[in-house]
Image: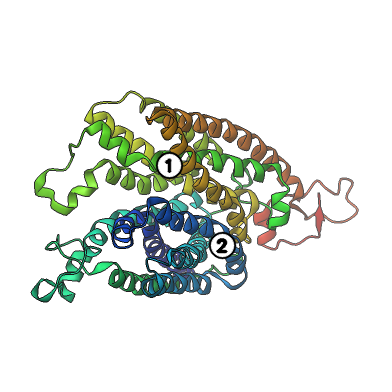
Amino acid sequence: MKTETEAARWKVLAGALIVQIVLGTVYAFSIFVKPLETQFGWDRLTTQWAFSCALATFAITMIPAGRLQDRIGPRKVAFIGGILLGLSFLLGSILVSESRPWALYLTYGLLGGAGIGFAYVCPIAAAVKWFPDKKGLVTGLSVAGFGAGALFFAGPASTLLLPPGSGTEAMGLSQVLLVALGISEGSGFGIGWRTFFILHGLTSAVFVSLGALLLSNPPREWKPRGWEPDHRRGDFASEMEWKKMLNTPLCCMLWLTFIFGATSGLMAIGQWKPLMGAILKGKTFAPAWMGTMGRFVEPVGILAIFNALGRIFWGKMSDLIDRPRAMMIMFLAQGMAFMLLVSIESHAAVFVASVLVGLNFGGTFALFPSATADYFGTKNLGVNYGWIFTAYGVAGILGPVVGGVLYDATGAYVMAFVFAGILCFIASGCSVVVWSLARNQSERLPQALPVLCTVPLGTADPFSGCTADSAAVEDKEIGPLVEA
């Protein structure tokens, strides 16, 4: 039985990666912009509203989705998310037209955003419950797919979205599969955005559903072999419901820290391609022989790769040095990286900047869910992290808007990155406050644990044999329980 449950948690992690890679394609929205604007004559604001709507709905929907998955488990809720995401593209292929941009907002924006919100929270909550001994690392692995999904999706999708050819120039099924897998560059023709929406909708629904089948919660009172909880690291965190959590100063500081850190990152990422293009002056990192694979060594590709790796790296680091320390160091390093962007000119500096910004921005999405589990327990992690994640919804609006305003006002990217750096330094300072609040909560925790007494009644010092060791409680040693 023990061996089966040990194997089951790795199966859950595999399911988490499958689900998150598909969901991560939302970050490749920019590839839809040109085909839609070309066919319908829409301006940039018209198309960008769909992306903003998707991000906002994603963040908001995580609250009810998290609450539902805490009640009925991650498998059913993730399955619902996959179906909603698939339907959003299928309906979009039918309803979107030149006179109906609102159909794109309803399908891709509301329905697709809701699908992502429903599915996103499930792998995180399930994985943290299965890996209490590696919360940070497994959270990083779970969300790494979300960071990498757009990278693997954008190149092939850009080719498939090209207008379809006619007669012998039309793409056959085998060509579509080769391009979708990144094996072929195509021949200058695609399948058009409507057919692509149908293909992507079906693929998303199928693969998210398959990943959902691998998700489950561990048996009650299950713990990894040889692992014992440590209250100093939050392993004895009280299981708070969301209403009680929202009334704690620690929750407020986590939320504010998330806003400052994510706003700075989104502000920078939204302008990364034009900034790097201006610095490189039209030159490229990729040699011609790399073909379509050259996108992996361009600044945006490098940032995306390290965005995914940063989730794993900082998740593991936080397991070693604890969550607030990792946040403090990460945001401090990110702030310094943004300040250095003001004066970079060489190709080497562009590469290093892309690495650092991607690495540190990605870490945000590993540290906050694991910190939420540390401080407020895993039982209600779905809905609790849903509330914390609303900070990302706020950042998704503030980051791009503030960055665009600063660029329009100055005609340069300098002020946007200076402001992003200042926000990171503020986030680092907030992390120190989180550290202090978390430590105070940890110091109070042992006194709330059940005390186990194993001495006979009538002893002169009846509490001399009492212990607050929860392992003893779990082993059901003989003796009455007394609350300290």
Between 457 and 353, which is closer to the camera in this rendering? 353
The amino acid type found where label 1 is placed reads Phe
Q: Which mark is residue 361?
A: 1
Residue 329's x, y, as percent? 48, 32
Task: Identify the residue under disc 2.
Answer: 61
Q: Residue at the spot x=59%, y=73% of the render?
A: 72
Rendered residue at 65%/46% (across/down) = 251
The local secondary structure at tag 1 comes to helix
Few, some or many residues within 10 Å of mark 1 (<14, 14–19, 20+): many
- The percent coordinates of residue 189 (x first, y second) are 16, 65
Query: Is residue 42 visible from the viewing direction of this image?
Result: yes
Work out whether residue 235 or residue 181 is closer to the camera in this orientation and state it: 181
**Secondary element at tag 2:** helix
Quarter holding residue 29: bottom left
Q: Which x, y percent locates residue 87?
A: 43, 74
Vertical relation: 278 (above or below) 185: above
Which residue is painted at 11% across and 63% down in the image?
187
User: Image height check: is 353 above or below 35?
Assistant: above
| 182 relative position to 72: left or right | left
Q: Are marks 2 and 1 in contact (CB under 8 Å)?
A: no
- Classify residue 101 by image quadrant: bottom left
In the image, taking residue 15 as reference, residue 35 lies left or right, namely left
> Which-is-in-front pick, marks 2 and 1?
2
N-term-proximal mark, 2 vs 1: 2
Other residues around mark 2 within 10 Å, as few (<14) / some (14–19) / many (≥20) = many
Three-letter amino acid code of the residue under disc 2: Thr
